Image (spheres, rainbow, N blue to C red):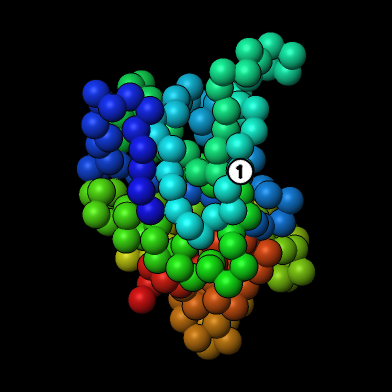
Amino acid sequence: MRLVPIEESKPLDLKGHTLVVPGCGGVAHLGELCVDAVVSTYGLSRVAIAETRHLLPVAMVSAFDEPGKSDGSSITTAAELYQGAAQPGLSVLQLRSVVVEGRRQALARDILRWAQEAGVSKILVLASCSSHVKRDADLRAGSELRYVSVGSSEGAGADSDILPLGHSVPEEELRGPADGPAAAFAMLRGSGLARTLVLQAAE
């Protein structure tokens, strides 16, 4: 993966950043919509265009221009990096295109390698999950949000409403902890790139 800065005079800095990535290609493209919400909520700006041969190329009207008010000078591409001065330590990689058939593993490796080389400290993947994996305990839970964690003992922090993905499944059935890669392997269906990213990160 190669990043092309929007302003050549401003070098990109991701050292120590939390990188937010969508599980592109998931159910209803929920990951991409969540990432758009993060960009919009925190007022982030596009700082680079990402080039990779593992995503189909795409160009369209800017995703953040109001309908009817675009002057056509700004376009949205397949992969873009967003940052903002008001949110130091936060970077967002938006992926808007479809992964080339057979290249999901390669794209996940590409993203993880690039993030490591750039000095990213954490990667947060936002994705959907098919509801067919729900159990009775999920139906009784107060939140639809679930998490898995790789290489960190922090989990979801103090927010008890966010449960591990495999919280309703015995560890012996998962063959691992409820918030780990084993839960992602067994239950993270319909998540697009997210499952592959989690499993690759755990290797």
- Which sits in the foreground, 67 or 84? 67
Residue 137: horizontal and vertical position, in percent? Answer: 69, 67
Residue appearing at x 74%, y 14% in the figure: 68
- Which sits in the foreground, 139 or 76? 76
- Which sits in the foreground, 6 or 147? 6
State left or right for residue 105 relative to residue 168. Answer: left
137 relative to 160, above or below? below
Residue appearing at x 50%, y 86% in the figure: 175
Q: Element type at marker 1?
A: loop
Q: How many labels does the image show?
A: 1
40 relative to 30, above or below? above
State left or right for residue 133 relative to residue 108. Answer: right
State left or right for residue 145 relative to residue 114. Answer: right
Q: Is residue 101 visible?
A: yes
120 relative to 164, above or below? above
Judging by the rendered image, the residue that carries numbered circle 1 is 58
Residue 136: horizontal and vertical position, in percent? Answer: 75, 69
Residue 113: horizontal and vertical position, in percent? Answer: 32, 61
115 relative to 200, above or below? above
Q: How crowded is mark 1: few (under 14 residues within 10 Å), some or many (20 or more)?
A: few
Q: Can residue 141 be seen in this view?
A: no
What amino acid is labelled 1 in the image? Val
Residue appearing at x 73%, y 51% in the figure: 28
* Image quadrant occupied by the C terminus: bottom left
Residue 65: horizontal and vertical position, in percent? Answer: 63, 19
Residue appearing at x 47%, y 39% in the figure: 80
Which image quarter: residue 99?
bottom right
Which image quarter: residue 83?
top left
